[in-house]
Image (spheres, grey):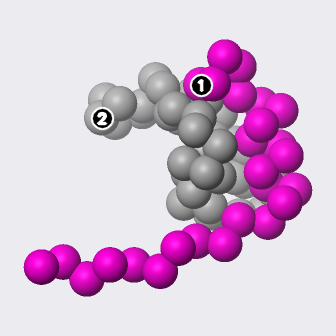
């Protein structure tokens, strides 16, 4: 059984920025990366914010989503 990772702590300012950037409950992958860079956090933190807010990542740069 795979080891479960601890939850990622998402700062309130990241949650607010993701909520503001997401249109119709969606956030483009490129936009998520740019947002992470501008906020000084990893893309994983932005991804965790999306998970917490119920926002979907779309237009994946790798074609995964």
The outermost residue toward the left is 1
Q: Quadrant of the N terminus?
A: bottom left
Q: Does residue 40 appear left or right of residue 6 in this picture?
A: right
Extreme residue toward the top, this view = 24
Above or below for 62 versus 1 = above
The secondary element bearing badge 1 is classed as: strand
Q: Which residue is at 52% across, 32% downward? A: 56
Q: Is residue 15 visible?
A: yes
Residue 33 can be seen, yes or no: no
- Whole-number angstrom distance, CA of label 1 to CA of label 2: 15 Å
Which corner quadrant holds the C terminus? top left
Q: Is residue 54 above or below residue 24?
A: below
Percent of width and height locating residue 37: 72, 53
Label located before the other in sequence (1 or 2)? 1
Residue occupying the point 61% across, 51% down: 52
Q: Residues within 10 Å of mark 1 (few under 14, many from 20)?
A: some
Callout 1 touching callout 2 (CB < 8 Å):
no
Task: Determine which residue is flagged by label 2.
Answer: 64
Give x and y (percent) for residue 19.
77, 37
- Residue 26 x, y percent position in the rendering: 59, 25
Viewer-nearest residue: 19 or 60: 19
Q: Residue at x 66, y 72 (%)?
A: 9
Quadrant in which residue 54 is drawn: top right
Could you say which quadrant of the image residue 61 lies in? top left
**Which range of residues does the magenta coloring cover?**
1-26
Q: Residues within 10 Å of mark 2 (few under 14, many from 20)?
A: few
Residue 10, labelled with which disc? none
Residue under circle 1? 26
Residue sitting at x 32%, y 78%: 4
Q: Secondary structure at mark 2?
A: loop
Circle nearer the viewer, 1 or 2: 1
């Amino acid at each position: 059984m795979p080891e479960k990772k601890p939850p990622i702590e998402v700062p309130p300012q990241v949650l607010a920025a993701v909520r503001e950037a997401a249109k119709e409950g969606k956030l483009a992958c490129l936009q998520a990366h740019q947002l992470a860079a501008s906020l000084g956090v990893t893309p994983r933190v932005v991804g965790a914010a999306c998970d917490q807010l119920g926002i979907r990542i779309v237009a994946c740069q790798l074609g995964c989503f």
